[in-house]
């Protein structure tokens, strides 16, 4: 068994990458633990990501943008994008986008998804500075940002 990843992963991703037998061995040896259904922590993982997945979502919004080295205003609690069930059960607080909820794909959202979910957590000035930082770092183009918010009011 080599190349064991550490962090927080969807269980099905670990089945693909290391296989069911290796994963079961890690769980038995308490080198991995189930955070919630479908999500497993292997080895050490950042606390904000663990907290987000435990709460019933993934690390998104300002927390994810900061992880992608985007400049964001100071904040304290982890910003979480809840999955459909967690939102329905109100286990939040969760950050919301305009439009329907998106499926989970990883423990930390990519830049476009995180930006979409930051609209209610930033004032207009904060939004402009965050978008400016994203474009300046080459993470998204102006057109990509405009396209992302084409349906927003
Ligand atoms: Zn937020």
Image (tube, grey):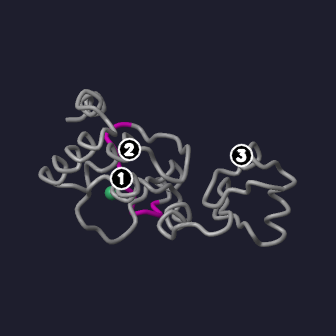
For label 3, the SS is: helix
Question: Horizontal and vertical percent for residue 76?
Answer: 32, 72
Quarter of the figure that contains the N terminus: bottom right
Write down the residue under mark 1: 65
Residue 135 in the image: above or below residue 65: above
Write down the residue under mark 3: 12
Please give the name of the residue rendered at 62% of the width and 69% of the height, measured from the top-left corner.
44
Question: Horizontal and vertical percent for residue 49?
Answer: 51, 62
For label 1, the SS is: helix
Q: Is residue 121 left or right of residue 12?
A: left
**Crowd tier of the residue under label 2, counting other residues whose Cα lies within 10 Å: few below 14, some 14–19, many 20 or above:** many
Q: Which mark is residue 111?
A: 2
Are the two marked residues, 2 and 1, in contact with CB atoms closer than 8 angstroms? Answer: yes
Please give the name of the residue rendered at 33% of the width and 43% of the height, measured from the top-left corner.
116
The stretch of residues the image draws in magenta is 90-99
Q: Is residue 96 magenta?
A: yes
Are the two marked residues, 3 and 2, in contact with CB atoms closer than 8 angstroms? Answer: no
Q: Nearer the viewer, residue 110 or 133?
A: 133
Magenta segment's dominant SS is: loop
Please give the name of the residue rendered at 69% of the width and 64% of the height, measured from the top-left corner.
34
Q: Nearer the viewer, mark 3 or mark 2?
A: 2
């Amino acid at each position: 068994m080599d190349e064991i990843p550490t962090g927080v992963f969807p269980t099905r991703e670990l089945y693909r990458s290391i296989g069911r037998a290796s994963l079961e061995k890690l769980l038995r040896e308490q080198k991995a633990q189930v955070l919630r259904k479908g999500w497993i922590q292997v080895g050490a993982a950042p606390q904000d990501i663990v907290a987000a997945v435990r709460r019933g979502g993934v690390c998104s919004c300002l927390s994810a943008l900061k992880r992608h080295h985007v400049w964001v205003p100071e904040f304290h609690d982890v910003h979480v994008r809840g999955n459909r069930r967690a939102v329905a059960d109100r286990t939040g607080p969760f950050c919301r986008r305009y439009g329907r909820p998106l499926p989970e794909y990883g423990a930390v959202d990519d830049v476009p998804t995180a930006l979409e979910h930051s609209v209610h957590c930033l004032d207009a000035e904060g939004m402009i500075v965050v978008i400016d930082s994203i474009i300046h770092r080459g993470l998204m183009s102006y057109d990509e940002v405009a396209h992302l918010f084409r349906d927003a009011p």
